[in-house]
Amino acid sequence: MSHLMNTYSRLPVAFSHGEGSWLTDTEGKVYLDALSGIAVNTLGHRHPALVAAIATQASRLLHASNLYRIPEQERLADKLAVLSGMEEVFLCNSGCEANEAAIKLARLHGHRQGVDSPATIVMERAFHGRTMATLSATGNRKAQAGFEPLVAGFVRVRYNDLEAIRTLARANQNVVAVMLEIVQGEGGINAADIEFQRGLRALCDDRGWLLICDEVQCGMGRTGTWFAFQHSGVRPDVVTMAKGLGGGVPIGACLAAGLAKGLFQPGKHGSTFGGNQLASIAALTTIDVIEREGLIDHARSVGESIRSGLATALADCRGVVQIRGQGLMIGIELDRPCSELVLLALHAGLLINVTADTVIRLLPPLTFSADEGRELTSRLAVLIRAFLAST
Ligand SMILES: *Cc1c(COP(=O)(O)O)cnc(C)c1O
């Protein structure tokens, strides 16, 4: 019997090592990795530049504490500011922690505006994390069940429904922020319409609300731009990131600009591990490799060919509802629950995920080659056909 708490229903496999887009299990079987640890292994596995940078840093200094200056962290903050157009960066260790910082910023902002009980508008089917505040912001009743009382101060609306938010704005004087994923990950690869994003920006400006973008999954180049919000040209006031930021080393970030800038002062927030030497170097190196290898454009074009390849291969398949996504964040919605496909794919040497019950989710590393894209497309099309024929 395992001594691990029963938080995940794990697949019957353990991996021993990886190389690029490929993982080898403890029995020696090889798998094509089209999930990259849920959008974490940005550079695939064992990227030589990342391995070397981590090893060098480990041999020098792993951690010293935020009680002191950390030049590596300062350089990372500078880099993230340039890439995002944001102004300030707080470094932490995970997505939910980055979102906790964002939620605290919204509350500070509200109190500064004289709102005693500030509320943040959040979306249906959103996922923001598992800590109490981020779970309360998450739009999944199953994930929340049993953990009541939830944290107060969230109001939920339909995704992509600007009118609902305008109506709320008239009715609720406590609203101080809107929080959303530009592309919902766990919710089933649903993208925010460009017009919705621009309308939100205008409404936030008009009302003095913070626009908070959770880019924990869709950021870091995944959708074919550094940040998913960059497709619309809208600049948020707060952006959170984590998953792919350190290429596999845990690190998160909360970026602020505009009205959200300057809200945190010493004593208001912190994180023991946040942005330590090792994690900062991993993130700096991951960003550097993305730039040197042109992986943002690469993600856009390989993602495009995977989607069009799948569309061709599945054209006559009536159970396929939609193939969608941007860059290397891809969803294939079927007309029926399909979580069984994950195990079928595993047996066939392919790592994928199913989310929101009916959506096959692909999040390959940004280094995924065009050939690997074709390999993924053909293997997955066979599996989907067989699954649809048998259910
Ligand atoms: C994964 C995820 C989170 C939570 O990140 P953790 O590192 O697991 O805490 C938050 N928001 C989004 C959009 C995510 O995909």
Image (cartoon, rainbow, N blue to C red):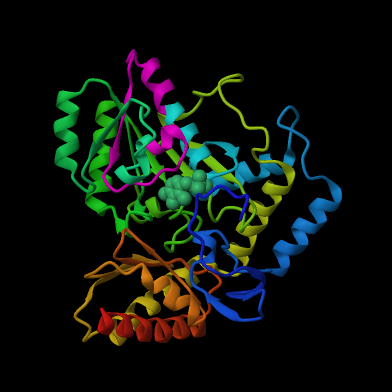
Residue 126 among those drawn in magenta: yes
- Residue 380 locus on image (x, y percent): 39, 81
Residue 381 among those drawn in magenta: no
Horizontal side, residue 114 vs residue 9: left or right: left
Q: Is residue 336 above or below residue 305?
A: above
Give whichever of 206, 168 is nearer the camera. Answer: 168
Horizontal side, residue 126 vs residue 2: left or right: left
Give whichever of 69, 84 is nearer the camera. Answer: 69
Disc count in the image? 0
Task: Please give the name of the residue rendered at 49% of the width and 76% of the height, measured from the top-left corner.
Answer: 346
Give whichever of 334, 197 is nearer the camera. Answer: 334
Image quadrant occupied by the N terminus = bottom right
Q: Is residue 274 above or below residue 28?
A: above
Horizontal side, residue 306 vs residue 285: left or right: left
Q: Is residue 259 above or below residue 293?
A: above
Q: Is residue 120 above or below residue 22?
A: above
Residue 268, quarter of the rendered image: top right
Image quadrant occupied by the C terminus = bottom left
Task: Please give the name of the residue rendered at 60% of the width and 50% of the height, measured from the top-left corner.
Answer: 4
Task: Please give the name of the residue rendered at 30% of the width and 56% of the height, measured from the top-left corner.
Answer: 191
Residue numbers of the magenta segment: 106-135
- Residue 95 locus on image (x, y percent): 50, 44
Residue 341, quarter of the rendered image: bottom left
Q: Does residue 270 appear in the picture of this structure? A: yes
Q: Does residue 257 appear in the picture of this structure? A: no
- Residue 30 locus on image (x, y percent): 60, 81
Residue 110, quarter of the rendered image: top left
Residue lying at the far right of the rendered structure: 59
- Residue 85 locus on image (x, y percent): 48, 44
Task: Please give the name of the residue rendered at 49% of the width and 41% of the height, measured from the top-left corner.
Answer: 96
